Image (cartoon, rainbow, N blue to C red):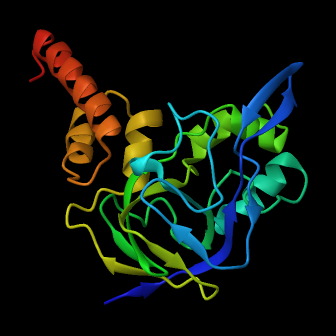
Amino acid sequence: MSQSIEVVSLNVGRPQMVEYRGMRIKTGIFKQPVDGPVYLAKTNLEGDGQADLIHHGGENKAVMVYSYDHYPYWAEQIGREMPISAFGENLTVRGMLEHEVCIGDVYRLGEAVVQVCQPRVPCFKVEVRLGDPTVLPKVARTGYTGFYLRVLEEGMIGEDRRFERLERAEEGVSVAMINRSLYHEYTNLELLEEVLSAKALASEWRVLAEERRDKLRRVYAEKGKL
């Protein structure tokens, strides 16, 4: 059965130069809402762009999603109202919290078909966007990271912005589980093995997780815990 999701805002933006701690940096995090139809290709939305193509963009980071449900928390933490696309997300939605969304879940987004493939790991550019140097540790503590979609089928996103879940991943590995493994339970081998069971996990995450799993196995074997 499909599940409809409310899209609060669809956001795109080209990289721009900004001031940060006395330096000039280039960033694509300052995205703005758009109203008209937008085409979603394999690597990004029409009109969108990233400055750092090593760490951002590409097929496993085509669309970044963030839940509007987290905005009140951040407004309280920062002491002011949050602008739309405060975390540089392409889709600001209601619902789709990290503990509810699983790696491999498939959605229809307008005419396109997309799949959840990895959590978002915020970098210092979020500090630039929000003007708060304390935000990154809070993201790690709360797990309010958002997540990325890969594009299975390209297509147009119309003004109605239809967004509905078509398929639930059978492994049940939530975005929150990966965040727990990354930020809170770094040496939890059982949790890491469960994370690696997600077939749709982005390749970059899988490589890092496998390396950490192998290291933990060696450590536990040396201690006689395996």
Give the residue displayed 27% in from the left and 46% down from the top: 195
Please provide percent x and percent y for residue 32. Answer: 77, 61
Left or right? Give the position of 95 relative to 73: left
Please provide percent x and percent y for residue 84. Answer: 77, 63
Give the residue displayed 75% in from the left and 54% down from the top: 86
Q: Quadrant of residue 158?
A: bottom right
Q: Quadrant of residue 123?
A: top right
Judging depth in this view, the residue of 11 and 86 nearest the camera is 11
**Quadrant in which the N terminus is drawn:** bottom left
Q: Is residue 221 visible?
A: yes
Q: Quadrant of residue 10?
A: bottom right
Left or right? Give the position of 88 relative to 193: right
Which residue reaches farthest top? 222
In the depicted structure, whether residue 91 falls above or below residue 185: below
Q: Is residue 188 visible?
A: no
Give the residue displayed 68% in from the left and 64% down from the top: 11
**Quadrant in which the C terminus is drawn:** top left
Please provide percent x and percent y for residue 128. Answer: 79, 36
Left or right? Give the position of 109 relative to 170: right
Counting the numbered discs, the total is 0
Left or right? Give the position of 110 relative to 93: left
Judging depth in this view, the residue of 137 and 109 nearest the camera is 109
Judging depth in this view, the residue of 97 and 48 nearest the camera is 48
Judging depth in this view, the residue of 143 and 65 nearest the camera is 65
Give the residue displayed 62% in from the left and 42% down from the top: 50
